[in-house]
Amino acid sequence: MYNVILNLHSYWAFLVLAVLIIATVNSIVKYVGKKEYGPKDFRLALFTIIVSHIQLLIGIILYVVSPRLSLFSELGIGGVMKDSISRLYLIEHPVINIIALVFITMGYSKHKAKLSSHAKFKTISIFYAIGLILLLSRIPWSIWLGL
């Protein structure tokens, strides 16, 4: 079961990154170009938040069923913090990615309250870009891409 969820989490991450990059670039380009905010922009922002939240749910399930979780009882929090791989998987990756999702969610929520297209695109651009940078910073690239 663990391997199935791990693969789902890994492959779904490609979708999350692709959609988040597209939504962020779309909002930046349209912000700079002073374009009108339309239904397609709303759907893109909404789809981004949906796939991101699904990834969070998959990640929580993966965290709970992970054999790495037993390292807390074996090594203690100090031992986990001393080992960079354990720290990445058990502390940094989940915490930073949850914070990234908070930024994405805040951007989506705040943009709905804005009245002008310019303000909507600016809000999405800022919050989604912060979320994207945070996500990219905590992906275990060497393992994820098989390097």
Image (tube, grey):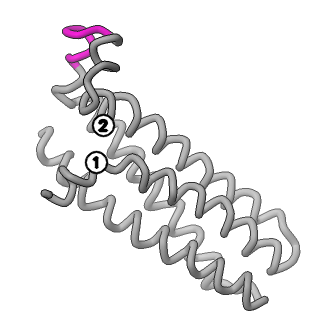
Q: Is residue 30 above or below residue 70?
A: below
| Viewer-closest of 4 and 77 | 77
Q: Main SS type for the magenta part?
A: helix
Taking the spot 34% from the left edge, 20% from the top edge, the residue there is 81
Residue 78, position in %: x, y?
A: 34, 11
Label 2 vs 1, first from the N-terminus: 2
Instruction: Give the label, 2 or 1, closer to the camera.
Output: 1
Q: Which residues are magenta?
A: 70-76
Q: What amino acid is labelled 2 in the image?
A: Ile
Q: In the drawing, what numbered circle is on residue 140?
A: 1
* Residue that label 2 marks: 61
Q: Is residue 110 above or below residue 125?
A: above
Q: What amino acid is labelled 1 in the image?
A: Pro
Q: Secondary structure at mark 1?
A: loop
Tag 2 near tag 1, CB within 8 Å = no
Q: Secondary structure at mark 2?
A: helix
Seen in the image, is 111 located left or right of residue 20? Answer: right
| Viewer-closest of 41 and 124 | 124
Q: Is residue 146 above or below residue 85?
A: below
Q: Quadrant of residue 130?
A: bottom right
Residue 91, position in %: x, y?
A: 38, 29
Q: How many marks?
A: 2
Taking the spot 30% from the left edge, 19% from the top edge, the residue there is 82
Taking the spot 14% from the left edge, 48% from the top edge, the residue there is 4
